[in-house]
Image (tube, rainbow, N blue to C red):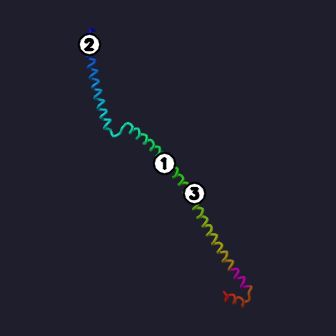
Amino acid sequence: MTTGSAVVLILSSCNFSVSHLETLKQERNELQHLLQNQKFTPSDVERINREKSELQQTITSLSKSLEDAEQHRWNEEIALAKVKETVSSNIVDMFNDLKQIREQIRKLDERLDGNMQVRLAPKQTVALCIQD
């Protein structure tokens, strides 16, 4: 290769480099313009992503707490239902016992009245009826 053709090659290469440099400068200016006109900076995007992650963790934690609370409420409702059933059963039993006691008292009253009338003389029976 001759010196002249080497110079032409170098100049051609330089022209290409200058042209490429101008293209790169133009791209840089366009990117800077885009960056300046963006609503969010890269640091804003990072902050937003961190906050999103923190909020997601909070949601996960609160969801777990909610599940635990619902399970606890369910267990309490079951326990309450069992207590209500027991109380209801006890009330029924007590009512039946009360009916039996009333019946026994009635029968004892009848027997006692019958025994007193048999033991007392007729005049005393009349006196007892008047005093009541």
Q: Quadrant of the N terminus?
A: top left
In terms of secondary structure, what is the magenta stretch mainly?
helix
Cα distance between the residues tagged 2 and 3: 98 Å
Task: Look at 59% across and 64% down and name the residue there.
Answer: 87
In the rendered structure, are the residues bearing label 3 and label 1 in contact, judged by CB atoms less than 8 Å apart? no
Q: Quadrant of the C terminus?
A: bottom right
Q: Amino acid at mark 1?
A: Leu
Vertical position of residue 100 compared to residue 50: above or below:
below
Q: What percent of the width, then of the height, locates residue 7?
A: 26, 13
Judge from the rendering whether residue 17 lies leftward or rightward of residue 77; answer left or right.
left
Query: Quick one: SS at disc 3?
Result: helix
In the rendered structure, are the residues bearing label 2 and label 1 in contact, judged by CB atoms less than 8 Å apart? no
Q: What percent of the width, then of the height, locates residue 51?
A: 43, 42
Vertical position of residue 9 compared to residue 57: above or below:
above
Judge from the rendering whether residue 78 lies leftward or rightward of residue 117; answer left or right.
left
Q: What percent of the width, then of the height, locates residue 127?
A: 70, 90
Q: Quadrant of residue 26?
A: top left
Cα distance between the residues tagged 2 and 1: 74 Å
Cα distance between the residues tagged 3 and 1: 25 Å
Residue 69: in magenta span: no
Q: Which residue is mark 3?
A: 79
Mark on residue 7?
2
Which mark sits nearer the N-terminus, 2 or 3?
2
Vertical position of residue 114 compared to residue 58: above or below:
below
Q: What percent of the width, then of the height, locates residue 78?
A: 56, 56
Q: Quadrant of residue 104?
A: bottom right
Of 25 and 86, the residue lying toward us: 25
The magenta-colored residue range is 110-118
Query: Quick one: SS at disc 1?
Result: helix
Mark on residue 62?
1
Task: Look at 67% across and 76% down and name the residue there.
Answer: 105
